[in-house]
Image (cartoon, rainbow, N blue to C red):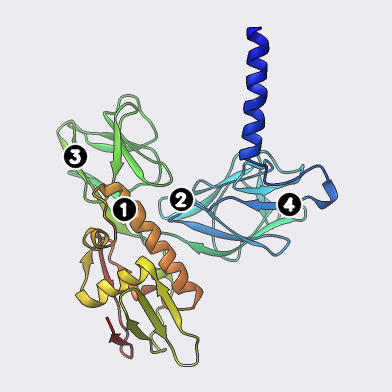
Amino acid sequence: MDFLHFLWNHYHRANNQVASNPPRTVLTQLPQRKLYTTANAALHATVHFKLPNGEVHALGHGAMIGRLWTATLQLNDGRISEAHAMVSLRGRDLRLLALRGRFGIHGKPLSDLVLREGQCISFASGIDLTVVHLEVPDSLLALQASGVARQVLSGVTALYGGSRPRMVAGWHSAAACHVWPTGASWMRGTHTNAEVLVSGDQWTVDGVSFVAVEERNRNSQATIQDVNYSRALRIVNRFDTIHLLRDGEPVVVITGRGARLISELACIGCAVNWEVLAAQLWDESRRDVLRRRWDMLLLRLRQKLRQHSIRSNLIRADGSGLLELVLGPQDELIDET
């Protein structure tokens, strides 16, 4: 009876799980199968792939490409591995890493590729993904310590103090402290005791002080593209809404916290620390939560500006935690708050 009771419960749990988490694709009718489906893209760094059917999908750090419906980007083809490849932010670059499969460019098989706009990546004959756009962070998290050169974090890193302080890639059981990424944040500590790591944090490892700092990413769009000030921009500040006007172009309206952020910067009139601004936008005391919300807000705001061909440095981060509103010589700020 106990075994039958177990089977009955297991059957109902399975049915409930399927009902609450339906599969993303229906494979019972193979000719009508949907080849490409995408889960939510990760934040902070994103690659936009154009698929053979013309669809464009955004994949972030940690996104997996594969045959299974659980993949972030599903390529429903028998020639594709279950977990074929993964998008990963490694230091300054967004990369495509082979998992159980391979990919190639111009017939050359690859297992590791630094993603660049315009690349056409082949996963199988007839399954080519084109990189149409890249978004990488304006700033990166780096560590520095006395006697140790500043190092941009790119993965799991072991920290050593004592008489020979150093940072070593990978997990080392002898190290007293490690840092590692989760996709949403960085962590520091040990496998039994860890906390979120953000810029400005300072702590000691075997008598040596380590400091987390922001470093400008030279591969970000703001640094690799020329800034165009030739088109005058009028910014109408209404606090809860921001209207961006250019001659001959539709009005771009920004609402919500994005509008409040621009309004605060316009009123302050100089560079200000991100934590000061974030405290005005959210009633939240946890610094790590504030940072995640802040990064998400900036990403969405910059995406909107880019979508409407408005220069990316209108809201400029200096890499040390300061943010400012940058006006061109012909720009006009109109205060209607």
Of marks 2 and 1, the one in the foreground: 1
Q: Earlier in the sequence, mark 3 or mark 2?
A: 2
Q: CA distance from mark 4 to mark 3?
A: 49 Å
Q: Position of residue 256 (x, y in %)?
A: 38, 68
Q: Earlier in the sequence, mark 2 or mark 1?
A: 2
Identify residue for label 1: 291
Residue in view at x 46 percent, y 50 percent: 89
Q: Earlier in the sequence, mark 4 or mark 3?
A: 4
Residue 297 found in image quarter: bottom left
Q: CA distance from mark 2 to mark 1?
A: 18 Å
Q: Is residue 265 left or right of residue 104?
A: left
35 and 255: which is toward the camera: 255
Q: Amino acid at mark 1?
A: Arg
80 and 91: which is toward the camera: 80
Q: Which mark is residue 319?
A: none
Identify residue for label 3: 203
Identify residue for label 4: 35
Q: CA distance from mark 4 to mark 2?
A: 26 Å
Which image quadrant: the N terminus?
Answer: top right
Residue 182 found in image quarter: top left
Of marks 4 and 2, the one in the foreground: 4
Identify residue for label 2: 89
Of marks 4 and 3, the one in the foreground: 4
Q: Residue furthest left?
A: 207
Asked if residue 281 is positioned above or below residue 192 in the image, the reply reads below
Q: Position of residue 162 (x, y in %)?
A: 18, 31
Q: Earlier in the sequence, mark 4 or mark 2?
A: 4
Q: Earlier in the sequence, mark 3 or mark 1?
A: 3
Residue 130 found in image quarter: bottom right
Mark 2 Cα-neighbour bin, 10 Å: few <14, some 14–19, many ≥20: many
Q: Amino acid at mark 3?
A: Trp
